[in-house]
Image (cartoon, helix red, strand yellow):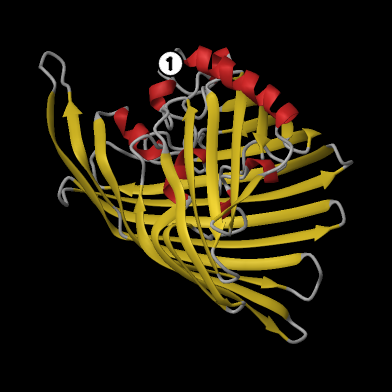
Amino acid sequence: MHSMTKTTLLTALLCAAPAVMRAQFDFTLDGLPVQVHSFASQGFAYSNTNNYLTMDTSQGSFNMTDVGANVSVRINDKLRIGVQVYDRDFGQLGKWHPELDWATVDYRYKDWLGFRGGIVKTVFGLENDTQDMDFLHTFALQPQSVYPTDLRDATIHHTGGDIYGSVPIKNLGSFSYTVFGGLRQDSKYGGYPYMLTATGGNLTSYGGPQVGADLRWNTPLKGLVVGSAHMGESITGKGTWTLAFPGEAPFSMAYEEHSNRDWTNQFYGEYTVGKLRLASEYRRYWRDEDIFGNTWEVTTDVRGWYASAEYRISKRLAVGSYYSRWAVAWVDTMAGLVESPSQSAPDRHLYDKVVTARVDLTKFWNVKVEGHFMDGYGAPGMYPDGFYTATNLQGLKPTTNLLLVRTGWNF
């Protein structure tokens, strides 16, 4: 089916669905309560200069669609199982290749001790494990400095297990913790594999073990939460690399990269009072990797933070704004590949000022209108940040203004 036809059909379904679906789909199976939920969204993006998130946004693009469905069964008061299937087509991301977002067995022994296993959503910061719940968020795109859409498939889950719980402390509120370990496995249709295609890379696998922890303090001040998280990984990528030189036929060779050291630190805070929500997070990602069998070493240092404010004006209308700031530095042993000398250079940073309005047309149907005013385009050949050389063949301009309209449905 032609992509425009699919987009038109999905948009029509989104408009029609709220009229017929008014609540979640619940039933019992052999006496066990079962819940079924689904969601879908369709977006339109238009930018004045650069193409963004692999879409042809400079011409206006409807190529921003995602869908998901999940089912969960409560076996008893302590044991629950569930699974969610997700698919998307965002420009060159996803490409309608469905994946399991999560498939989890969850056993909560006590409030202070629980266990999860399977394909588990990664608890890391305020929003990482709710990336798939667009209907919960005021913003059409979460702050990309900390929650990049093009790396969603890599960050939202891990295959392994968690230990988690919440412990009240007299006069000090409570502490919630999650300790996790398992395997990360990136989709071939994510941002990092796509970035490498611009220079001939073709990854067939990318992932590896990761361990980490998230600790948050629900303070005695009502509505105030602060926390921190840490994760270490050992990532390996394999595939082929195709080289082409003037006057010679292209040839391919085996490609391999692996982490020497790979970690992420995150710190966050949130304050909710009445109809106002304030939030801020800081994330630093560090990776030292060897490429082509220890012949080429690259060290990448990515730092991002944002501050956001959201306000619910009425039952139907919410508004919000955030400032997102992202910067990258690297050290590379390949001769001739040199980073810009200053962080003020557009290929060293991406700063984004955002304003948005969300209108809830019904309980299950919303429309978001969002403006992005971006300075810089990051490092399109070194780290995924929304801007890619393969979709900006005429070169990248230092600033980008983006209009995003996104409608979503859930039940």
Q: Position of residue 79 (x, y in %)?
A: 53, 68
Residue at 69% across, 50% down: 307
Q: Quick check: can you spot residue 360? A: no
Q: Quick check: can you spot residue 407? A: yes
Q: Is residue 286 above or below residue 181?
A: above
Q: Is residue 331 above or below residue 229?
A: above
Residue at 50% across, 34% down: 386
Question: Which kind of residue does numbered mark 1 sit on?
Answer: Gln
Q: Position of residue 365 (x, y in %)?
A: 73, 33
Secondary element type, mark 1: loop
Q: Position of residue 199 (x, y in %)?
A: 28, 29
Q: Is residue 121 above or below residue 113?
A: above
Q: Is residue 64 left or right of residue 274?
A: left
Residue at 13% across, 21% down: 250
Q: Residue furthest bottom?
A: 170
Using the image as rendered, state which of residue 182 and residue 199 is in the foreground: 182
To which quarter of the image does residue 134 belong?
Answer: top right
Residue where numbered disc 1 is placed: 394
- The mark total stands at 1
Q: Residues within 10 Å of mark 1 (few under 14, many from 20)?
A: few
Q: Quadrant of the N terminus?
A: top left
Q: Position of residue 109 (x, y in %)?
A: 54, 77
Q: Is residue 233 left or right of residue 111?
A: left
Using the image as rendered, state which of residue 401 and residue 179 is in the foreground: 179
Q: Quadrant of the C terminus?
A: top right
Residue at 60% across, 37% down: 39
